[in-house]
Amino acid sequence: MKRESLELHIEIARQRLNDMEKQYGIEHISILEQSKLLDELINEYNRTYFPKQKNSISNL
């Protein structure tokens, strides 16, 4: 997926999560599912555009 497309998907998922929280409340199961979807998109973005570097602090 192209960077701009992935960024758009992330923004749409973030807005949907905010809208759903207003509609259903924070403890509704749909909020958890949408949050997981947003996390997956953000993780994909980070893996694609910010790959781990050999000399990162986590590797020390």
Image (cartoon, rainbow, N blue to C red):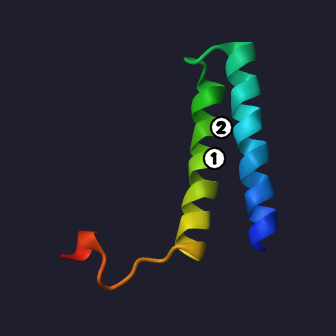
- Determine whether the residue tagged by mark 1 lies in a helix, strand or loop: helix
Does 16 sit left or right of 21 as displayed?
A: right
Q: Which residue, as the protein is rendered here, is positioned at the far left?
A: 60
Q: At 32% from the left edge and 85% from the top edge, which residue is drawn? A: 54
Question: Which of 42/55 is in front?
Answer: 55
Percent from the top left, x then y, of residue 50?
52, 73
| Residue at the disc numbered 1 | 38
Q: At 55% from the left edge and 17% from the top edge, which residue is drawn? A: 27
The reply to whether dot 1 and dot 2 touch (C-beta < 8 Å) is: yes
Q: The N terminus lies in which quarter of the figure?
A: bottom right
| Residue at the disc numbered 2 | 34
Does 52 sit left or right of 43 as displayed?
A: left
Vertical relation: 32 (above or below) 43: above
Residue 24 appearing in the image: yes
Distance between mark 1 and mark 2 Cα atoms: 6 Å
Q: At 80% from the left edge and 55% from the top edge, which residue is drawn? A: 8
Percent from the top left, x then y, of residue 10?
71, 51
